[in-house]
Image (tube, helix red, strand yellow):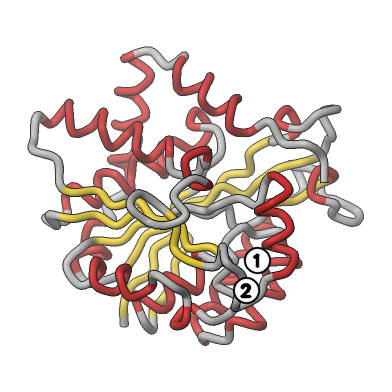
Amino acid sequence: MAICLCSGVYQDERDGLSERQIDAILLSGRSYDLASCLKTGGALIFPHTYILECGSYIAACVHAALDSGADHCLALGVLHSFGDTLGAARRQERVDHPLRMVHGPHRPPGEYWKSEYSLLSFIFLWEEEIKRRGIRAPKLSIRFPYLVAKSPSTLPGMDELEAIAKDACIVATADLCHHGLAYNSENPYSMNEGADFAKKSIEENLALLQTGDYARYYAHCQKIKSDSYDIGPTLRHLVGPFTPKIHDMTLVDTAPLYEGFVSPSWVAASLVTMEKL
């Protein structure tokens, strides 16, 4: 896989937003009304690529969490396996690996999540919307389950997530389908050709997650280059049986994020609800 420049590029993008652009992104999130999913114990999934491309999906989840009436929001992020230490841990995927746990503030070992970017756009829009509403912010807990290893119930720290989830609404980020040369896809589709492939792939992925067969789900994540290895099983464990729905999806060109501008490379940024049954 090519070297990814995501974190710095996305930070520069957020830093360059004008107040007018931020307002427009937050307003665009009002196109979706998803609070009822959270009120009934379900969860939302939003992407973490360019905010100018998919900020409406992230904003939709911010609005849903704030409109749900919950005093506490649990936001689950992807802990990407960048770097030698996390990369080696992901390749081993052992149930006894020392990094296998829920990471985040006040969680040991306390360092790896600090350079993770997957929740930063959500936190950014969360804080901006709270300022715009002039409200007292609900509590926001951010956590990064890592190396679920097809067994969310045994993940160290899951007991804390279960306790939080009893009273909190749940949102999570995942890019559910990566495709193209940067992701070592064979015979890759161009962005003009890939929408049907991406939608079908994500629907199949969510259908497997519904069953709770984490081994098959994990294998399918590998196939479609989804980064939801940990997020999917964690949500399924916390929410229980659910009905998935893709509310919207857009293909985002990610070739500029990789050294050498390897094209075609894209991610299917998706807004998904998991309605609790």
Under mark 1, the amino acid is: Lys
The percent position of residue 59, horizontal first and vertical second, equals 34, 40
The correct choice, above or below, for 16 with respect to 169 in the image is: above
Residues 104 and 237: in front is: 104
User: Mark 2 = which residue?
Assistant: 204
Query: As displayed, is residue 122 above or below residue 74?
Result: above
Q: Are marks 2 and 1 in contact (CB under 8 Å)?
A: yes
Residue 163: x and y, percent?
Answer: 24, 72
Neighbour class for label 2 at 10 Å: few (<14), some, many (≥20)?
Answer: some
Identify which residue is drawn at 33% across, 45% down.
60
Q: Residue flagged by tag 2: what amino acid is it?
A: Glu
* Residue that badge 1 annotates: 200
Q: Residue at x 34, y 24 (%)?
A: 24
- Would you identify the image quadrant in which residue 87 lies? bottom right
Q: In whole angstroms, how far apart are the C-alphas of marks 2 and 1?
A: 6 Å
| Quadrant in the rendering for residue 217 | bottom right
Residue ID at (55%, 33%): 50
Kindly tell me whether residue 76 is visible in this rendering.
no
Figure check: 16 above or below 46 = above
Q: Nearer the viewer, residue 8 or 92?
A: 92
Label 2 secondary element: helix
Q: Is residue 233 in view from this perspective?
A: yes
- Residue positioned 48% across, 66% down in the render: 101
